[in-house]
Image: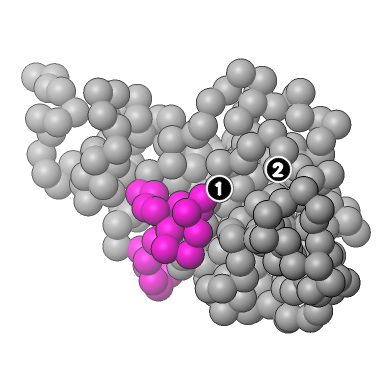
Amino acid sequence: MNGSPNDRPEGGTVLGIDTETLQLMDEQRGDTSREEFVRRALPKTALFDRFRRRGVRRLFVKHLALNDNDKNQIYISPSLDGMANLLRGRLSEGSGSASSTRAGSSPGRPKMVLHLDWVWITADDREVTAPNIKLIHYFQYPEARLSGFLSGCTDPPDSLRKRQLGRYGQRTLLFGTDGERVFGHVIAGPPGSGIPDIPGLLSSPVSTILLEAHLGGGGDDRRAAPGTHRAMASLCGTQR
């Protein structure tokens, strides 16, 4: 007899995902059927595994605005507080900067620059170094913005180019560190596509514009049935 997804035994799976993970997804799916929610979330869940395998346990997520691009940089947080310790970069002083149009500007105060060892994870799971990425704290705004994410990179995310924005819908940046390197990826759908369903996101205490997903520890993630991540990885078709 065929029952609804919610009538299935507690120990069962849907599309290879174990019961505990499904329960976490149920908290976010609202009126969407469990099967439909899982199908839509599969590529993003596979991305979690790509970060987890690289030692990332705390994943930051930002849904990008139109002005988050290579010309205007990407706004991450109001300061480097917290981020500098989390991302383990190298701090240096930049040039002085001031704005004549913003209240609270600090004329002549040098910018602080956090140089990052950043690696882009491509759609086919390759690693591409982005040697010139840095997080710059502009005191006069105040804002910390990600900069240089295309410079010197042989295969950067095309969806971060201002001149290419018309080719994509909503874009989402994911990044996290293994304690030394920072790994990043951009989910970008076709024109007209909305914000992707990403399970398990929480508000970040580091920045009000960031969300977080906690990926757990160890290589034998107990929330996934054996072979689940391999199956999901084969379905992962996100664009960079």
Dot 1 amino acid type: Lys
- Binning the other alpha carbons within 10 Å of mark 2 as few (below 14), some (14 to 19) or many (20 upward) gives some
Q: Which residues are magenta?
A: 200-221
Dot 2 amino acid type: Asp
The image quadrant where one finds the C terminus is top right
Residue of label 1: 62
Quadrant in the picture for residue 161: top right
User: Looking at the picture, how far across and down is residue 39, in whole percent?
Assistant: 40, 30
Q: Secondary structure at mark 2?
A: loop
User: Looking at the picture, how far across and down is residue 129, in whole percent?
Assistant: 79, 63
Q: Is residue 179 magenta?
A: no
Can residue 54 be spotted in the picture?
no
Residue of label 2: 68
Q: Nearer the viewer, residue 117 or 236?
A: 117
- Of pointers 2 and 1, the one earlier in the residue sequence: 1
Give the left or right position of residue 53, taking residue 111 as reference.
left
The image quadrant where one finds the N terminus is top left
Circles 2 and 1, Cβ within 8 Å, touching? The answer is: yes
Identify which residue is drawn at 79% across, 81% down: 92
199 up-or-down from 34: above or below: below
Give the left or right position of residue 146, taking residue 93 as reference.
left
Identify which residue is drawn at 43% across, 41% down: 198
Q: Residue 13 bears which disc, if any?
A: none
Colour style of the rendered protein structure: one colour
Can residue 44 be spotted in the picture?
yes
76 up-or-down from 165: above or below: below
